[in-house]
Image (cartoon, grey):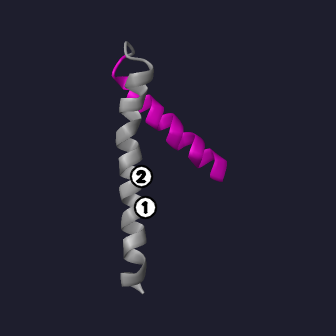
Amino acid sequence: MLPLIAPGVIAAWALGGFCSSLGARLARLIAPHAPHATGGLAALVALTTGHHRRA
């Protein structure tokens, strides 16, 4: 069973990491003169809103 679901689990984690790595860059493109913490705050907001919608 594990060999069947492992590729899907790995792909999901890879996609999550890819989207997380783009978050800071996209925030930098939208607000180029904002502090560097803007990218981290954008990722935090995205993750928090997704978490609260599930609850």
- Quarter placement of the N terminus: bottom left
Residue located at (46% from left, 31% from top): 42
Question: Which residue range is magenta in the image?
Answer: 35-54
Q: Could you give the CA–CA distance between mark 2 and mark 1, rounded to whole angstroms?
A: 6 Å
Q: Residue shown at 59%/41% (left/top)?
A: 49
Q: Residues within 10 Å of mark 2 (few under 14, many from 20)?
A: few
**Seen from this angle, which residue lies furthest top?**
33
Where does label 2 land, which residue? 16
Quarter-of-image position of residue 27: top left
The residue depicted at 36 percent of the width and 31 percent of the height is 25
Residue type of the residue flagged with mark 2: Gly
Q: Is residue 21 magenta?
A: no
Q: Quadrant of residue 4?
A: bottom left
Vertical position of residue 11 compared to residue 18: above or below: below
Name the foreground residue: 52 vs 14.
Answer: 14
| Residue furthest bottom in the image | 1
Where is residue 41? Give x, y as percent: 44, 29
Q: Position of residue 16 (x, y in %)?
A: 41, 52
Q: Give the SS element for disc 1.
A: helix
Compared with residue 7, is residue 14 higher up or lower down, i.e. above or below? above
Q: Amino acid at mark 1?
A: Ala
* Residue bearing the label numbered 1: 12
Residue 19 sits above or below residue 38 on the image: below
Q: Residues within 10 Å of mark 1 (few under 14, many from 20)?
A: few
- Cβ–Cβ below 8 Å for labels 2 and 1? yes
Residue 49 visible in image:
yes
Dominant secondary structure of the magenta stretch? Answer: helix
Residue 38, visible in the rendered structure: no
